[in-house]
Amino acid sequence: MEEKNPLLQVVDLSVDFRLNRKTALHAVRNVSFDLYRGETLGIVGESGCGKSVTCMSILQLNPASRTRYPSGQILFEGRDLLHMKQKQLRPIRGNEIAMVFQEPMTAMNPLFTIGDQLMEALRVHNPRMEKAEAYERSLEAVRSVKIPNPERILKSYPFTLSGGMRQRVMIAMAMITRPKLLICDEPTTALDVTIQAQVLDLMNELKQTHGTSIIFITHDLGVISEMADRVLIMYGGRVCEEADVDELFTAPRHPYTQGLIDSHPSPDYEGERLKVIPGSVPTLRDMPAGCPFNNRCAYATDACRDVFPDFEEAAPSHVVACHNWRAAKTEGGKAE
Amino acid sequence: MTEQFRANTNENYFLKAEGLTMHFPAASDAFGRPTSWIHGADDVSFAVPKGKTLGVVGESGCGKSTVGKMLLNIYRPTGGRIFYEGRDITDLSPKERRPYVKKMQLVWQDPYSSLDPRLRAGDIIAEPIDNFRLAKNRAERAEKVERLMKMCGLYPEMALHYPHQFSGGQRQRICIARALATDPEFVVCDEAVSALDVSIQAQIINLLKDLQDELRLTYLFISHDLNIVHFISDEIIVMYLGQIVERGTMETVYRNRAHPYTRALFSATPAFTAAEKKNKQRILLEGDVPSPVDPPKGCRFRSRCPYADKRCGEEPQWSEVEENHFVKCHLFS
């Protein structure tokens, strides 16, 4: 099998946003992960944790004038995307790596029909394609995302579609070039739950038929547990835990992951009050030194305030970056 | 509506809605007369006992916010009646309404747009106090603001800060403090935690629960997140396209979901523990919610319902599934 080499390797990625000559915000710090073919990687975290910035970096979609990459490599089939020129990236963007954004209305051009926009995606990457062929492919793409009456949809404008329909069109548009990697940034956050269920189901089906790898960004733990094979938990621009999805939900090791899971009211929770993580997410400007979670963590020691912990293996293919995960583990066990 | 259902709502309840209806004009002819109507809410009846929480769930456009706004007279209902401790408050004059405005407050969804960016936090919280002249002098006003801020988990020193200096969770605490400034008895929480991060959501929910215990508040808790509604509510109504399709106590509805829509809604909420995932059967609904402009006669869910048959062309009646649990579906009649 070819499974030896990951499709995408992010190595030690750091991203800075320059505000002015003196200050730079450290949006992402030392993020590394591998993504294999046909795998879904979920990235979970709260607003400002760097999950979107990490994924935008893959296609260099962060604002170029203000973004610096002090360290890191992003290897896509061995090619380093992070140090490519825009011109070299162009055949990869939207062709080999496609993206689905949260708000489908702002991601589409309101002045062109759905059909025009789908065909554009095809013909930009393959200028010699006949219009008729492009039309056929678009029709097939729209059909594959289970939109009724595809001929009519191709002729309609984005504003005439409902939110769920638009997000399906976005997925069709992303999948039309048969990308190897699909990056989904909160694709279902704006949708209702019954529509979300339809879209998630569809994405899983497409993944199985085409073998596409997916990076799935969300803040919703429930969605992650249904979609992902592996999960990356991010906080304050750093990865704090990485594990297989079932392992992560049954045996979370990082105090932040534990807090995140506990603060969700699960249906069989009996207590009167929810368990909470005290305090709030610090902004990038006042991120504490050492482990970014130290000022909200019940297990924080002096070491946590000085250095960011190294990754330790808590179980096979389960790594956690916490000085005190062993203490957190026993406590967590008691609470169950 | 069956007799049992009426009997149930006729008890001496704190806040009661009877047949609330809200139609918005959607299009009009050359003379400005409306020709079609958006059915925001149709024949919505429920009752909330004192000190309890009524959860309202449903998808966008189902009319759950419309119901909350009608109760607070932000929308004037086109039909139906609202009773507050037995008194009809549907058509009061502004002067007669004023004491009820004081007793019924609202917490909005988005703590970013519901706070005036030019006012300091302390002044935002004091606005209702000034409006209703609840403080005799500046000292008393300041003292009240301080008490409210402490109660909602804010540091009183923050009273001089502007909204942009607060995080989302803190802003929502300001909104709650402002809503409580008039000592209300009834608070509508319209998606009050939806815009917040997960770890902050839990803090706000705990705050709402503590405040309820302390001040004996009654909540109408509107949300699309079933897990949260399940956690906080004592009773629940499930809405679809402007109508209530199922209602009952939280536990009976949760344990024994009757209406096909309720079942689909609960099954669509992503499960997250391994055990939950295993014994979960997902019911996928076909299609989208139909337009609320001139909705079809009969059961409004029938276009997406897996059990729909001929009977569904007629409007279903309320049937009692078990004690304190009612459903509007032909499957149960």
Image (cartoon, rainbow, N blue to C red):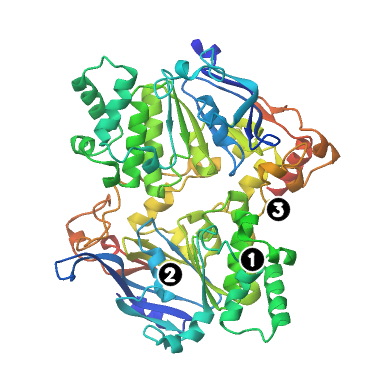
**Residue B302 appears at what percent x and percent y?**
24, 55
Query: Chain for mark 3?
Result: A
Between discs 2 and 1, the one toward the N terminus: 2
Query: Chain for mark 1?
Result: B
Q: Residues within 10 Å of mark 1 (few under 14, many from 20)?
A: some
Please name the residue that numbered disc 3 is placed on: A278
In the picture as drawn, the residue positioned furthest to the top comes out as A1
Using residue B100 as the reference point, say whether residue A248 is left or right of it.
right
Please name the residue that numbered disc 1 is placed on: B120
Task: Between residue B304 and residue B134, name the one nearer to us.
Answer: B134
Residue B162 falls in which quadrant of the image?
Answer: bottom right
**Residue A80 appears at what percent x and percent y?**
55, 15
Mark 2 to mark 3: distance in Å? 31 Å
Mark 1 to mark 3: distance in Å? 25 Å
Task: Between residue B168 and residue A77, name the one nearer to us.
Answer: B168
Residue B44 falls in which quadrant of the image?
Answer: bottom left
**Residue A275 appears at what percent x and percent y?**
66, 54
Q: Residues within 10 Å of mark 2 (few under 14, many from 20)?
A: many
Which element is circle 2 on? helix
Please name the residue that numbered disc 2 is placed on: B68
Which element is circle 3 on? loop
**Vertical order, A139 against A163 (above or below):** above
Query: Chain for mark 2?
Result: B
Task: Between residue B183 and residue B84, name the one nearer to us.
Answer: B183
